[in-house]
Amino acid sequence: MNGSRSADLINSLAYDKIISMSELTNKTALQLNSIFLNKEASAQQITEAFLQRIEQYDKTINAFISVNGELALKRAQELDQKLAAGESLGKLAGVPIGIKDLINLEGSETTAGSRMLNGYTSSFNATITQKVIDAGAIPLGKLNLDEFAMGSSNETSAYGNCKNPWDPNKVPGGSSGGSAAAIAAKMVPLAFGTDTGGSIRQPAAYCGITGLKPTYGRVSRYGIVAFASSLDQAGPMTQDVESNALLLEAMSGHDAKDSTSLENPVPNYLAAIEQGFKKTQSLKGLKIGIAQDFFVPELNSEVKAAVENAITKYKELGAEIIDISLNKIKYGLPTYYIIAPSEASSNLSRYDGVRYGLRDMDATSLSDLYPNSRANFGTEVKKRIMLGVYALSSGYYDAYYKKAQQARALIAEDFNIAFQQCDLILSPTAPATAFEIGSKTDDPLEMYLEDIMTVTVNLAGLPGISINCGYDSNNMPIGMQLIAPALEEARIYNAAYAFQSTTDFNKSPDMKSSKAIGV
Amino acid sequence: MATETKQEYNITIGLEVHAQLKTKSKLFCSCSTEFGKEPNANTCPVCMGYPGVLPVLNKQAVAYAITAGLALGCKIDLNSRFDRKQYFYPDLPKGYQISQFDNPICNHGKLSIGNKEVRILRIHMEEDAGKLVHAGAERLHGSDHSLVDLNRASTPLIEIVSEPDINSAEEAVTYVKELRKVLLYTEVCDGNMQEGSLRCDVNISLNKTGQPLGTRAEIKNVNSFRSISRAIEYEYKRQSQILDEGGKIVQETRLFEEGTGKTHSMRSKEEAHDYRYFPEPDLLPVTIEQKQVDDARQGLPELPQQKKTRYIEEFQVNEDTATTITDDLETAHFFEKVLSKGAKANKAANWIIGPIAAYLNENKKSLNETKLSAELLAEMLVLIEKGTISDNIAKNDIINELLENGSPVAKLIEDKGLAQITDTGAIEAIVQEVIDTNPKQVEQFKSGNDKIKGFFVGQVMKKTQGKAPPSLVNQLLGKLLK
């Protein structure tokens, strides 16, 4: 770890070496790693602290589909032994992590939030799971999500709605709602999310945390249940930008098991922050593009105001604000809702009840087995499978799928042109703040609008982050999005860190307040 | 149907041949492709289609596809692509087969079958499905449950699609035989039809001369040369009968049943699957460097038809002999090695397609399952050539020993005393003895019965156990009988 940071930490803790459990759960991932390496708390103590917090709050929040405390404690003890033996340890050593239940963790269930996979136990680790375990992270359990990551509110999960820790009557966003809620409620300091059309960034915005969708191909998809293969990308979800950078570095890199993963070397993202804003305390020279195309009529006025304040803040930090045009992004939603369901309809074919997952045991013929078993998909998943099957059908392919691919190329080109004028693009993450559970379930089109700011970033394969930039009149967090050219995650992190470290918008909900959880 | 109303139709056939590539591992994972393992032994999360797995393309399979394409005169597309072909079946773990649809790796080839050239439309790569084992019955009908074996799932195939240039069952069989030879010569496929390494779908239509092509039926599950021929003959009868009676052929997929030799309808055009092809997003486009194609072209072996032509021109063997030897690459290699050890071409060829082939047929063996090496055969042939042993002795007393035990030729001749007697004096004495002990026959000969000479030859051969050179015996008899 960085010397000065460790020194700071030791200074702050020197007068009291006994760290309470609640203090541990208040620490960032980066801090926890130092605490562990400096032997101020054991990995076991850290793990127990988070497990206890899950025990305390998750009955209400429902962020976890499964918790594997035994396995986590066993891993923690191994890490403690390694540390005692003086063995070298990875960059995430001693830090617990939550894994979106779309991502395989060997020996644990992977449900994908669906009844279809109820009881399915993973026989192997996803590449990213293996990488963070190798880096010393301790998986605590599997996080709630919309079924097969299809949804923007976590309401399509077959394992109950995850709730927003800022207000349990509201959705945490989706599909990585469990991940965002678990981070916000400090039940885990690191979490994996996946993002196909905004599934990391929108819940990050709704729960007031930091979530980044990396460049397509930056992170291996091997071992992650596929939704839409050409759009899916796993990414880090944390409270603060630095922990996010730390986790991305651990997750990233070429994987021989994923042909679409990129071979470019993985930068040290934390070093980029150290050498960047931390050193200069200025964003001079950074050009931030603002496209009015993102400021749609549906945009909530409080969100708009908060994002405008953020733009002002960036000006103060030395950035140059430039107006850009992204007039093709209006095709984003229709394009996305052709491509994503098309690929999904194909990716979900394997859930047929033949080899694993739920199977209609009463079926007496093959022609009964398929429909009866697949009837266990939820409504939203069925809807998207039907959309996809339709779009790929003979006679419709050219009009839908092929056209959507053409539109996708235009959208990507639109971003390319914009990035000739600016280094980053700033936008709201979502049109509004978290909504009441159940308030949009009857209106799929309104629900799909949730993705309007984020889908184009997936279609263009670009990296994008959501960080908090304010609170609405109900004290619900407001997210803003920073988008960069491909593989410029370091640029995003530096700018996001600059904002986060000079504002007071990265707070956590008071879990004991009247509005939150009745404990 | 009365035979006199029977009309003659032209038959038009196109073939789709699936050949399993000889890679050690599967097309998209590292599982072994070995045949005959216990069910599901050669599987992993990738070829079982577990949640979250991704395919990774086997580069050797691409190299084999390129080689096959070049050997069949195809143009290699430097930028081809995989697609998903989607349908549900329990032997298809992902619910889609990764195949190449509108952008295959090879296009526009040709294969000569005797006097005719069959155009090849395309060759594409794809993964195989697994197989179902129907329990309690021979086939699906009557079985009470089915078991899934995914050992074969995701093994690499090429599908070679011909143009409809074939016009008889005989031509179809020749085409597949020639195709199989090319695949064996280029060592991209083991050609084993029993194990399913080479499988065939047959498209057949009938029409009358001067009329447009008829509606075709696609016959699936035609997996031996005999089946190809039977299926086509059956289809000709079936379709011509419908046409004779004024009926229409429906476009459909039919299944050939080996037991009955009949085809029956699997699904009609209306019931045909909509495979909903779309580009496989988990794989990058297949990009090939021109250099790889050039190198593969350089590395192509001599192909069957080239070899045959060379045998005729270089070794002056006749066409039938050249065809028989080049039909099997192992035999051709053996033949060439025998020649390199000093044997004469025609002799070697006659031995290989004569006594040796007879032995192999009788014992149902291939050459490499015998103990006969090219060196041994060459040694024997050289000894015949030199007159040390006779052809008959070699046929009767030596060749089986070589095939079965690989015995050293020289030692065998010595131990069994098989060498011809070259001492003229000794043979002359025997001839004289035979003349002396058979005065009655000598009388007959002298009274003009020339045929009786054979009797004396036989007696001499009997006394010498066949080791006297026949020409010498004849010469001596001529002299001594006077």
Image (cartoon, coloured by chain):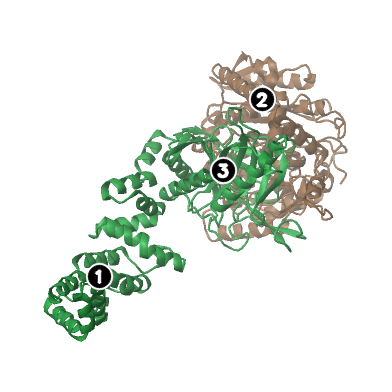
Chain colours: A brown, B green
- Is the residue B165 above or below the residue B311 in the image? above
Q: Quadrant of residue B289?
A: top left
Circles 2 and 1: CB distance less than 8 Å? Answer: no
Instruction: Check the image and name the residue furthest to the bottom.
Output: B437
Which chain does the residue under circle 3 lie in?
Answer: B
Which chain does the residue under circle 2 lie in?
Answer: A
Task: Report the mark closest to the observer, 2 or 1.
Answer: 1
What residue lies at 66% left-to-right and 25% top-to-bottom? Answer: A398
Which chain does the residue under circle 1 lie in?
Answer: B
Residue identified by numbered label 2: A398
Residue identified by numbered label 1: B390
Under mark 2, the amino acid is Asp
Out of A296 and B173, give the one closest to the viewer. B173
- Is the residue B441 above or below the residue B328 in the image? below
What residue lies at 20% left-to-right and 86% top-to-bottom? Answer: B437
- Give the percent coordinates (x, y) of residue B162: 53, 38
